[in-house]
Amino acid sequence: IDKLEIIKQKIWDKKWRIIMFDIPEKLRRLRDSLRLHFKEIGLMELQKSVFVYPYPCADEISFIVEFFEIRHYVHLAEVTKLSNDSRLRLHFDLPA
């Protein structure tokens, strides 16, 4: 899991991948570890339990989720519009 990485596409398909989770307080250490792994593979934190990435990453997210055995706590969405995404575009070096 420590060597996991997401292959960046050359051309952005203009979709945002949003990863959301709601992990109980009793699993706080696991939740913190999940956040750390998401950041390490390049996801950007929008809120404490919401991360975003501009390229396909479902396989990598599934791997992490299965590794931690937290499937029912994590959701992945793919959206074509995200309000106020200029900061995200700048962070990921994407066209405006």
Image (cartoon, rainbow, N blue to C red):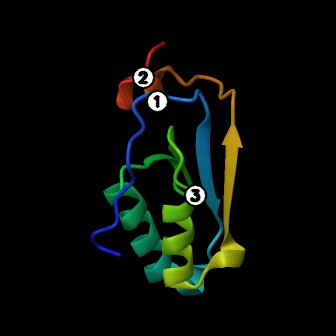
Label 2 – label 3 distance at C-alpha: 20 Å
Choose between 6 and 64: the one closer to the eye. Answer: 6
Disc 2 is placed on an element classified as: loop
How far, Cα to Cα, is label 1 from label 2?
8 Å
Q: Earlier in the sequence, mark 3 or mark 1?
A: 3
Residue farthest top in this picture: 96
Q: Earlier in the sequence, mark 1 or mark 2?
A: 1
Circle on res. 6:
none
- Residue 74 in the image: state x and y as whole percent: 65, 67
Q: Residue beneath label 3, please? A: 58
In the rendered image, which quarter contains the N terminus? bottom left
Q: Residues within 10 Å of mark 2 (few under 14, many from 20)?
A: few
**Could you tell me which residue is drawn at 48 percent across and 63 percent down?**
60
Tag 3: Cα neighbours inside 10 Å, few (<14), some, or many (≥20)? some
Q: Measured from the top left, where is residue 70 in percent x and y?
A: 61, 80
Question: Which of the two marks, 1 or 2, is nearer to us in this view?
Answer: 2
Which mark is drawn over residue 94?
A: 2
* Residue under numbered circle 1: 88
3 or 1: mark nearer the eye: 3
Q: Is residue 80 above or below residue 53?
A: above
User: What amino acid is found at the position of numbered circle 3 in the picture?
Assistant: Ala
Dot 1: element: helix
